[in-house]
Image (cartoon, helix red, strand yellow):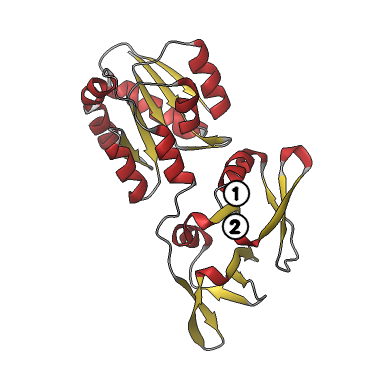
Amino acid sequence: MNIVIIEDEVVVAEDLELNIRKLIDEPVDIVQLKSVKEGIAWFKKNDAPDLVFSDIQLGDGLSFEIFIAESVAVPVIFCTAYDEYALDAFKANGIDYILKPFTQQTLNSALQKYKQLKKIFSTDQNPQFDALMQMLTGKDTQRAASVLVYHQDKIIPVKMEDIALFYLENEVTHLLTFSGKCYFPNKNLDELEKLSGSYFFRTNRQSLICRKAITDVSSFFSRKLSLNLNVPFGEKIIVSKGKASQFLNWLTKG
């Protein structure tokens, strides 16, 4: 049996391979791939494996790009931390998934479904990876209408459409509006990222930016991107080269 693991976190990939070998009672060859670029190159030169375990978000883009580029028609089990709207998309296309952090039980359950997945992929039906990619990068997910913030001795709602960006400063979450007002949300950036929908982009650990706040983008050292905003903000917001492709794809959806 031939299996490909697409995962950019080495520890996660090694743990996944170790558990797969424990659960499969037959000789198995496993290849680990760590990026979209490496994945496309590998599938271009090699025969399709029997099964793929794949993370979604890789350092240089979404793993769907691999399957679209090389028309990969094999069962793919996603190891994902995405929310339910994305998981519904996987189920609609006949793709199984395991949530991170996975357990041996969930991994075993996914492997038990392998025969069913194999039957699906042995037909002319191909999963709509392009539709999934569009859903994860271009669909405006259900976003909150407003965010609660602390202001003096009150808690008030700030409309999402009035927010230019969220950012972290001295480990405290801040909210900056288009009118230049600064507030302190009652949630951290991870929680706000889920609430804000695809109209906002997590540029790095410190900032979550609204598309409408971006005037233009400049190339920066080592293929990073520097954002120029239409609101006053003292710090330069930088997008890493690993996220640059995903960011530019997101920016075109506006």
Q: Which mark is residue 211?
A: 2
For the N terminus, which image quadrant?
top left
| Secondary-structure class at tag 2 | helix
Q: Which mark is residue 230?
A: none
Is residue 171 something one can see in this rendering? no
Mark with earlier residue (2, 1): 2
Is residue 134 something one can see in this rendering? yes
| Residue 117 horizontal/vertical position (percent) | 25, 25
Name the residue: 45% across, 26% down: 67
| Residue 158 horizontal/vertical position (percent) | 51, 76
In the picture, measured across the screen, residue 118 lies left or right of residue 226, that is left
Q: Residue 242 lies in what quarter of the image?
A: top right
Name the residue: 53% across, 61% down: 189
Name the residue: 48% across, 61% down: 196
| Secondary-structure class at tag 1 | helix
In the displayed structure, 145 sits above or below 42; it is below
- Which residue is denoted by mark 1 in the rendering? 251
Asked whether the beta carbons under mark 2 and mark 1 sit within 8 Å of each other, the answer is yes
Q: How crowded is mark 1: few (under 14 residues within 10 Å), some or many (20 or more)?
A: some
| Residue 133 horizontal/vertical position (percent) | 45, 39
Residue nearest the viewer, comparing 251 with 31: 251
Name the residue: 48% across, 17% down: 43
Going by the numbered disc 2, the residue's amino acid type is: Arg
